[in-house]
Image (cartoon, rainbow, N blue to C red):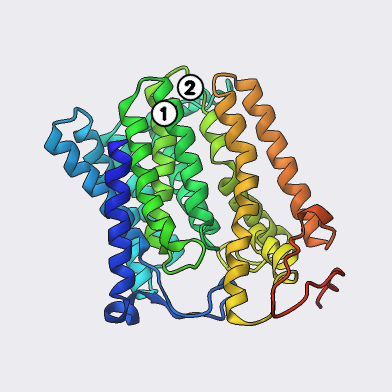
Amino acid sequence: MQVLFISFLLSFLGTMFIIRTSHWHGDLSADHDLGGVQKFHVHAVPRIGGVAVMLGLLAVAAWYSYKGIIERHAFWLLILVSLPAFFGGLVEDLTKRVSPLARLILTMIAAMAGFWLLDAGIERIDIPMLDPMVAFWPVALLFTAVAVAGVANAVNIIDGYNGLAAMVSMMIFAAFGYVGWQLHDPLIWRTAFAMIGAILGFFVWNYPRGHIFLGDGGAYLIGFMVGEMAVLLVARHEHVTPWFPLLVVIYPVFETLFSIWRKKFVRGMSPGMPDGVHLHMLVYKRLVRWAVGSPEARHKTTRNALTSPYLWLLCSTSVVPAVLFWKNPLALQISLAVFVVLYVLLYRQLVRFRSPNWLVLRKRLKSRKVVQHRPKASN
């Protein structure tokens, strides 16, 4: 618990400092784009929350060194290898000039560094016909780099509403920490606690009012740590099936894969181009936006915050079974299939304006009565 408290305290104070000094650096660090297809805030907001998250991790590393904790070297290395992913996103936050491909490549470089320095490599996937191929180290290196970078990018993709990526990531790290505790692996569970504390220190300022955003630096840092922790669990423990971490991270990962398929093969556009029909955006448009408030700015902020709990609940449908059945590969595979079906059915219902009544938020605000009929589809 000391780890969690230290990372929380430094992240909390760091986030507060960034917010309180935004008038000094806001021209450089704030998100001033209020009209983009994936923009749902109403005024310029600092988007360098990842700096505070990194500060929380550095505080834990310093405490490890001071106390002489045996995992200090591995934890420092974990922070070190994360730097290409973190700084690639942070520079994008400050300059808006780092392309998605460049950030992806930098995160792959970070994963390759983890492969060599931490032995964090995917050398089995528990699929008999493919395991011999993955066991060949060049293939393992490439597969690890792509997988970790893909997870980091997936976390960045779901970072669209106040508290969404932060809470989902904390749920993921809680699952990893629980299994690490069961396996008596201090590096795993202590790192998980450190990440939860660092993210929580940011979260209390981000949710529900959105005083600060993670930004690409924060999203890629957290996403990289999610991917690296998933790899380390499997690499360090032969009896942990890769199906466990895959089920834990399936919400952001499947969101990314589904989006690539939708953009490339359904809409005929580049997968790298932003659009407004991710699942979390459909939840906002179909379940929250039309039912809550007026077009006023204060109601837009409220709708933003009310969107995230829907996705937290969806994420729990994969994280909870993963924790319950982490020793059972068949149960994990079945749970994975159930999640995919649930996601596709929910997406299909939302995109067709057929969302179940019990999902539609109906909240009466003083300025406007709740509309009781469903909205018409826009052209």
Q: Point out residue 316 in the picture as x, y percentages from the top left corner.
A: 61, 41
- Residue positioned 39% across, 51% down in the render: 199
Is disc 1 surrounded by few (<14), some (14 to 19) or many (20+) residues within 10 Å?
many
- Residue positioned 65% across, 39% down in the render: 317
Res 271 visible? yes
Left or right of 299: which side holds 359?
A: right
Left or right of 10: which side holds 209?
A: right
Left or right of 41: which side holds 198?
A: left
Q: Quadrant of residue 128?
A: top right
Q: Is residue 165 above or below residue 329?
A: below
Q: Point out residue 268 in the picture as x, y percentages from the top left corner.
A: 70, 65
Q: Secondary structure at mark 1?
A: helix
- Residue positioned 45% across, 80% down in the render: 32
Q: In the rendered structure, which amino acid carries the disc numbered 2?
A: Val
Q: CA distance from mark 1 to mark 2?
A: 7 Å
Q: In this orientation, which residue lies closer to the viewer: 165 or 124?
A: 165
Q: In this orientation, which residue lies closer to the viewer: 31 or 316?
A: 316
- Residue behind mark 2: 240
Q: In the rendered structure, which amino acid carries the disc numbered 1?
A: Leu
Q: Is residue 2 above or below residue 186?
A: below
Q: In the rendered structure, are the residues bearing label 1 and label 2 in contact, judged by CB atoms less than 8 Å apart?
A: yes
Q: Point out residue 311 in the picture as x, y percentages from the top left corner.
A: 62, 52
Q: Secondary structure at mark 2?
A: loop
- Residue behind mark 1: 233
